[in-house]
Image (cartoon, rainbow, N blue to C red):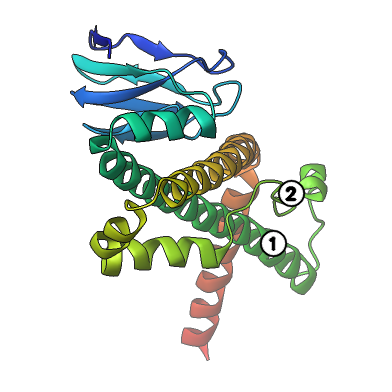
Amino acid sequence: MQVMKIQKGKRIAKRKDKVKEWYLIQSGSVIQKLGLAEVILGPNAILGILERDWYICDYIAAEDTAIAVIPCENADDLKNILSANERYRIVFLRTAIEQRHRIFVLYSQLYRRMSQFHAFVQTVFNDYKTFCANYQLDEQVFPQMDYFNRLEMKHKAEAWEVNNSTSLIKNVLKDYIQMMVKDDSLCVGVIMEASAQMHRAMLGIGEMVTYLSDRKKFFWQNLKMIFFICILTWQSVLVKGIWTSLR
């Protein structure tokens, strides 16, 4: 199996490149990058395991790194590799399960952040409208709010998938691997299932990264609205305090 030495900062695979093989990290670490989202992959991680015909992520050496080239493009190739090299079964199984878990963790973090950001901006805007109504003030026009909707995910990881992955990692990983590794079809099935879930979750991460990036621009463009609300609220509290002290 060919081993390649990659210098720190060098790109190993580029987004939208054709997937021709997988790479097993033997030493060092690699940054898996999709927009602003990043995952650090260490020894025994497999580059390409979540990809399909074309890479959806960039892979960049985080330090001087050694990777083994694995001629694998599909389930049949994987089965042949595992049949010829039984020692890879445990490595591939554990790696697929652990990498899936890390992707699910990142997905969950971004989904929570996206939901919190949307709720915060929506609450601020509603408070602004209420304040203007209560004090009979003319509202400023913010047409962008008409398009500030919650993201409808096209590629979604279900909560039960994330919870299942977490329980597997925390409670029964060793026993699960020992059971799956005994049969080629089970072994390949688990790896390819994890691969498909990672692929879908990573596409969802890409959706959320784009959403947050676009809405971040919206947020700063409309920061004056938030500043205006804060000033009005502060003035309201101040006037109320003065009025109370005069009574």
> Tag 1, which secondary structure?
helix
Q: CA distance from mark 2 to mark 1?
A: 16 Å
Instruction: State left or right for residue 231 relative to residue 165.
Output: right
Front-most of residues 129 and 149: 149
* Location of residue 91 with respect to 190 vertically, above or below: above
* Quarter of the image where one finds residue 212: top right
Question: Mark 1 packing: few (<14 Cα in 10 Å), some, or many (20+)?
Answer: many
Residue marked by disc 2:
148
Foreground: disc 2 or disc 1: 2
Front-most of residues 129 and 203: 203
Q: Position of residue 74 (x, y in %)?
A: 54, 29
Instruction: State left or right for residue 51 relative to residue 177.
Output: right
Amino acid type at image mark 1: Tyr
Q: Residue at x 50, y 77 (%)?
A: 242
Q: Quadrant of the N terminus?
A: top left
* Location of residue 76 with respect to 8 vertically, above or below: below
Q: Residue at x 30, y 25 (%)?
A: 24
Residue 128, numbered label: 1
* Location of residue 74 with respect to 134 vertically, above or below: above
Instruction: State left or right for residue 5 relative to residue 142.
Output: left
> Tag 2, which secondary structure?
loop
